[in-house]
Amino acid sequence: MSTLTEENTINSTEIKTELENTPPSPVLMIEDIQKLLPHRYPFLLVDRIIDFVPNKSATGIKNVTFNEPFFQGHFPERPIMPGVLIVEAMAQVGGIVLRHLPGMEDQLSLFAGIDKVRFRRPVVPGDRLTITTKLLVSRKRFGKMHGRAEVDGQLVCEGELMFSLVNL
């Protein structure tokens, strides 16, 4: 019969820390996202949706890798994700919210405007963008959202995104 030594005992703090660091299970995988958004590689900028509140908000993930085609020219010596693509990723997460609104299932959301967008830090290969969008206004053919992108809890970009809805 063996006895437990200190090194074999399980520390409840370690388990709690490990559980806290475990990413939440996805609500929508890439196959589900492709059913909702018309974007495809290389322009689909959402890898999964990890939180979704119908008619209100969504949180998505974009894993930024060195293999992204835009890094070949932006910039070869210091790869940085273009700000317009960060905003586009926020818009795509917002598009998930809009597609779930009643009567919007067969609509395509297009940019109608971008306000108060600010960039706080560069996004580089290896970063994991966590993007949250919250619906501010929803009318028959118009939507307005607040988008926020973070890397490791640090704000990268935020702003207001306006959408016009058109038939698919």
Image: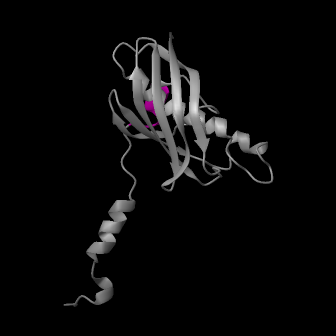
From the image, give the main secondary structure of the stretch colored magenta.
helix
Q: What residue is shown at x 65% (from left), y 35% (from top)?
A: 84
At a point 33% along the width and 16% down the height, the residue shown is 102
Rendered residue at 72%/40% (across/down): 70
Residue 82, image x, y percentages: 68, 41
Above or below — where is 166 with respect to 33? above
User: What is the x, y in percent for residue 18?
Assistant: 36, 65
Q: Tell me: residue 10, above or below residue 50.
A: below
Rendering coords of residue 129 (x, y %): 53, 47
- Residue 16 percent coordinates (x, y): 30, 67
| Horizontal relation, residue 128 to residue 121: left or right | left
Nearer the observer, 131 or 143:
143
Residue range of the region highlighted in magenta in the rendering = 28-35
Q: Does the magenta stretch include residue 54?
A: no
Based on the displayed image, in which of its 4 quarters is residue 119 positioned?
A: top right
Outermost residue, left direction? 1
Q: In this view, does 51 lie to the left or right of 85?
A: left
Extreme top residue here?
167
33 is within the stretch colored magenta = yes
The quarter in which the N terminus is drawn is: bottom left
Residue 59 is left or right of residue 157, and the answer is left
**What is the total number of numbered labels drawn onto the structure image?**
0
Q: Which quarter of the picture shows residue 32?
A: top left
How has the structure been colored for display? one colour
